[in-house]
Image: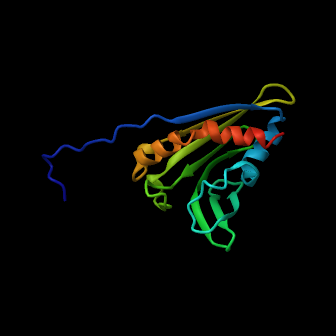
């Protein structure tokens, strides 16, 4: 039990990590590639399992899992889908803590909000905002690692290159 005379301290919000890219794809194809083909563009070095990555999966429905499957068949959860609005928006959690292990407690999740905007029939802008790092256990370490590794700008560059 806490002492009622001791004030509670709030964790200061950490700034979101953002990224934007424009791809030469219709919005429906841009959404499908981003959500359904992580294998095509997500760097294989970015995983938490012991085994090398065989597949990275984002299940296409609210409540769906975001996870990696290792070449040995093992699976490591990364988060859950919170919003699925084809082809304009997908929101999913990042439940990987500062030790780079899955945290099953959804109260400890940061959130990745991805929006797709048609800029004509054959071009789409994709905006990513990864926010809520302060909710993660070890959130500052996660924020610093993602930012130091190029952040979502690096990931979106890989995504854009996969469209060519």
Q: Quadrant of residue 113?
A: top right
- Residue at the image position 44 percent from the left and 58 percent from the top: 99
Q: Is residue 24 above or below residue 45?
A: above
Q: Residue at x 69, y 37 (%)?
A: 157
* Residue 85 occupies quadrant: top right
Lateral position of residue 107 relative to residue 160, left or right: left
Name the residue furthest bottom.
Answer: 72
Q: Position of residue 71 (x, y in %)?
A: 69, 70
- Quadrant where the N terminus sits is bottom left
Query: Along the line of sight, which residue is nearer the eye, 145 or 19?
Result: 145
Q: Left of 118 or right of it: where is 97?
A: left
Percent x, y of residue 141? 42, 47
Residue that extends furthest to the right in the rendered view of this protein: 121
**Total of numbered circles in the picture?**
0
**Residue at (12%, 46%) from the top-left corner?**
5
Tell me what residue is drawn at x 50 percent, y 61 percent: 102
65 vs 100, left or right, is right
Residue 44 pos. (x, y %): 66, 55
């Amino acid at each position: 039990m806490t002492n009622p005379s001791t004030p509670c301290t709030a964790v200061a919000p950490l700034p979101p990590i953002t990224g934007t890219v424009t791809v030469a794809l219709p919005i429906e194809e841009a959404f499908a590639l981003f959500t359904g083909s992580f294998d095509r563009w997500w760097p294989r070095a970015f995983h938490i399992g012991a085994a090398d990555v065989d597949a990275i999966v984002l299940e296409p429905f609210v409540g769906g899992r975001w996870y990696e499957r290792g070449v040995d068949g093992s699976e490591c959860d990364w988060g859950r889908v919170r919003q699925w609005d084809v082809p304009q928006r997908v929101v999913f959690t990042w439940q990987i803590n500062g030790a780079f292990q899955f945290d099953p407690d959804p109260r400890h999740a940061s959130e990745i909000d991805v929006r797709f905007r048609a800029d004509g029939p054959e071009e789409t802008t994709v905006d990513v905002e990864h926010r809520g790092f302060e909710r993660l256990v070890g959130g500052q370490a996660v924020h610093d690692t993602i930012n130091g590794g190029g952040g979502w700008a690096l990931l979106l560059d890989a995504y854009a290159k996969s469209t060519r």
